[in-house]
Each structure stands twice: as C-alpha cells, then as structure tokens.
Image (cartoon, rainbow, N blue to C red):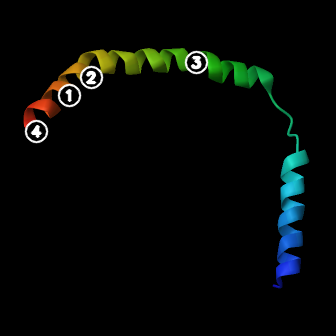
Amino acid sequence: MGRGRQKAKHTKVARELKYFSPNTDLSQLQRELGSSSTDEDAWAEYADKYGADDEDNFDDEE
C-alpha cells in the first residue's frame, strides 16, 4: 500500500475515533466506581500487614 493511501486510511480511522461517541450506561459506570472502595480497603489491609516489613527486609539485605 502506498504512503498516500496508508496516510488517508490512518486519517480516516483517527477521525472516526475522535468523533465516535458510544452510548454510555451511566448506572453501570456508577456501580463500577462505587464498588472500587471495597477493593481499596482490601489493598490497604495488605499494605498495613506486609508493607512495612518488606521495606525493612530490603534494607537488611544490602
């Protein structure tokens, strides 16, 4: 494929992506964003339990 045709194809794809507006299910988005707080709490638990010990162990090895 020649450079001109390739560039035209890329321009067409870029234009389609720029102006494409899918239908957004806002209620589904709200459910997904609302459930992330429980995931953060679980990670915070692990960080509290294992985070400080890992830093100390790396310092001892050097």
Residue at point 84%, 57% (across, down):
14
Q: Are marks 2 and 3 in contact (CB under 8 Å)?
A: no
Label 3 packing within 10 angstroms: few (<14), some (14-19), many (20+): few
Q: Earlier in the sequence, mark 1 or mark 4?
A: 1
Instruction: Say which quadrant the C terminus sits in.
Output: top left
Instruction: Say which quadrant the N terminus sits in.
Output: bottom right
Which amino acid type is shown beneath numbered disc 4?
A: Glu
Q: How far apart are the alpha carbons under marks 4 and 2?
A: 18 Å
Q: Which residue is mark 2?
A: 51
Q: How many marks?
A: 4
Q: How far apart are the alpha carbons under marks 1 and 4?
A: 13 Å
Q: Which residue is mark 3?
A: 35
Residue at point 71%, 24% (across, down):
29
Q: Which residue is mark 1?
A: 54
Foreground label between 1 and 4? 4
Q: Which residue is mark 4?
A: 62
Foreground label between 3 and 4? 4
Q: Earlier in the sequence, mark 3 or mark 1?
A: 3
Answer with the quarter of the image where residue 54 lies. top left
Q: Are marks 1 and 2 in contact (CB under 8 Å)?
A: yes
Which amino acid type is shown beneath numbered disc 2?
A: Gly
Answer with the quarter of the image where residue 26 lies. top right
Which amino acid type is shown beneath numbered disc 1?
A: Asp
Question: Taking 54 as reference, is 45 left or right?
Answer: right
Image coordinates of residue 47 in percent, x first then y, are 32, 20
